Amino acid sequence: MRSIAIGFVLLTAGMAHQAAAQAPDGKTLYEATCKKCHGVLGTPPKTMKQQFPKIATFDAAFIAKHTEDSIVTILTKGKGEDMKPFKGKLTPVEMAAVAKYVHELATRPRP
């Protein structure tokens, strides 16, 4: 019975490690899809701010109003005419990884 329990623990640990290894990298996805408009650290470049005055800056104020789920919704549906939807370009799991990374960006100190 003990060997069955040990086998189960090892199998479960292996599956968790495999799932973590296959999880999408939010930073890489952000850099490929969001960085151009929202900036490396979540602060849009001046040219983007001029072109899209309502563009989001990923800071504490943004995060206070947006959960990771609401960011996924924005990624899925877009936001007005300025931000096109990423549905069909990113999977729901990839969007969740980007949303998590956006939350991480907001907690970083600004230069």
Image (cartoon, helix red, strand yellow):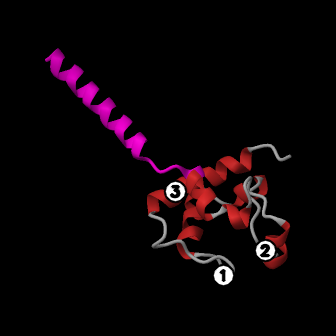
- Mark 1, Cα crowd under 10 Å, few <14 / some 14-19 / many 20+, is few
- Magenta: main secondary structure: helix
> In screen coordinates, is 62 left or right of 4?
right
- In contact (CB < 8 Å): disc 2 and disc 1: yes
User: Which element is circle 3 on?
Assistant: helix
Task: Please report the bounds of the magenta region as a residue range.
Answer: 1-27
Q: Earlier in the sequence, mark 2 or mark 1?
A: 2
Residue with the mark numbered 3: 96
User: Quick check: is 6 in the magenta stretch?
Assistant: yes
Where residue 57 sits: x, y (%)? 77, 61
N-terminal of the pair, mark 2 or mark 3, is 2
Instruction: Give coordinates of residue 8: x percent, y percent.
Output: 22, 27
Image mark count: 3
Q: Residue at x 57, y 52 (%)?
A: 28
Amino acid found under the numbered disc labelled 2: Lys
Question: Tag 3: Cα neighbours inside 10 Å, few (<14), some, or many (≥20)?
Answer: many
> Which structural element holds mark 1?
loop
Label 1, label 3: how far apart the Cα atoms are: 21 Å
**89 left or right, relative to 52:** left
Q: Label 3 near label 1: C-beta < 8 Å?
A: no
x, y percent for residue 25:
52, 49
| Residue that badge 2 annotates | 54
The amino acid type, in three-letter code, at marker 1 is: Gly
* Quarter of the N terminus within the rendering: top left
Report, in whole angstroms, how far the alpha carbon at label 2 lies from the one at label 3. Answer: 23 Å
**Real-space Cα distance between discs 2 and 1?**
10 Å
Pick the residue in front: 64 or 71.
71
Amino acid identity at mark 3: Ala
Residue 42 in magenta stretch: no
Please give left or right for residue 86 compared with residue 2 in the image: right
Q: Which mark is residue 80?
A: 1
